[in-house]
Image: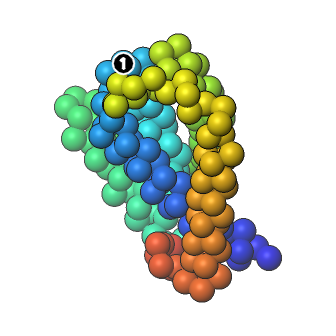
Amino acid sequence: YGWIIRYLHANGASMFFLCLFMHVGRGLYYGSFTFLETWNIGILLLFAVMATAFMGYVLPWGQMSFWGATVITNLLSAIPYIGTSLVEWIWGGFSVDKATLTRFFAFHFILPFVVTALVIVHLLFLHETGSNNPSGLSSDTDKIPFHPYFTIKDILGLMILMLLLMTLVLFMPDLLGDPDNYTPA
């Protein structure tokens, strides 16, 4: 069952990013950027999640892993004065090797814990101000009587998301990825 775990992980990450981008888009639409602390922690969260995704993308230890890690980390060489040294430091030598991918594996494991801590801080700042209400009307009247409707709506959304994920994993597992990633180096 290793194949289903691998494809659930890869395609689940893609679905997670779709949800994340919709969350950011909703925040932009409703003007949530006015809550500076919450918004800035959200930006840090987005960067941390993207770093985690990059570390995971280059992990299959295939030919494309070496290529992807080389191309993306080589962008750091554009930094004046320290760029080349920074790239060699990240690579652990003069080229991407097993040591580089091992280091990326460790970061791919550790960074989700950092993301979890940032989510807690994000929610903490959100509870300080409350969420944005663009209509300007008091939402106190919606809190208790509409609870079952909101709960059912959220459960339905989760079920649809799970159905889409399982359909993707079971029928088109490589649609959002590149099977060349698994070609041995």
| Residue at 41% over, 50% down | 22
| Residue 72 in the image, given as x and y percentages of width and height | 35, 53
| Residue 138 in the image, given as x and y percentages of width and height | 45, 23
134 is higher (above) or lower (below) than 95: above
The residue sitting at the right extreme is 1
128 is higher (above) or lower (below) than 179: above
The residue sitting at the bottom extreme is 171
| Residue 80 in the image, given as x and y percentages of width and height | 19, 31
Lateral position of residue 152 relative to residue 77, left or right: right
Q: Quadrant of the N terminus?
A: bottom right
Residue 132 or residue 79, whichever sits in front: 132
Lateral position of residue 94 relative to residue 116, left or right: left
For the image, the number of numbered tags is 1
Disc 1: which residue: 36
Q: Under tag 1, what secondary structure? A: helix
| Residue at 66% over, 32% down | 144
Residue 129 or residue 23, whichever sits in front: 129
Instruction: Name the amino acid, label 1.
Output: Leu
| Residue 105 in the image, given as x and y percentages of width and height | 62, 50
| Residue at 39% over, 26% down | 137
Let me know if residue 183 appears in the view.
no
Lateral position of residue 43 relative to residue 29, left or right: right
Lateral position of residue 26 relative to residue 100, left or right: left
Residue 17 or residue 151, whichever sits in front: 151
Callout 1: 10 Å neighbours few (<14), some, many (20+)? Answer: few
Residue 164 or residue 17, whichever sits in front: 164
| Residue at 41% over, 61% down | 68
Let me know if residue 130 appears in the view.
yes
8 is higher (above) or lower (below) than 106: below
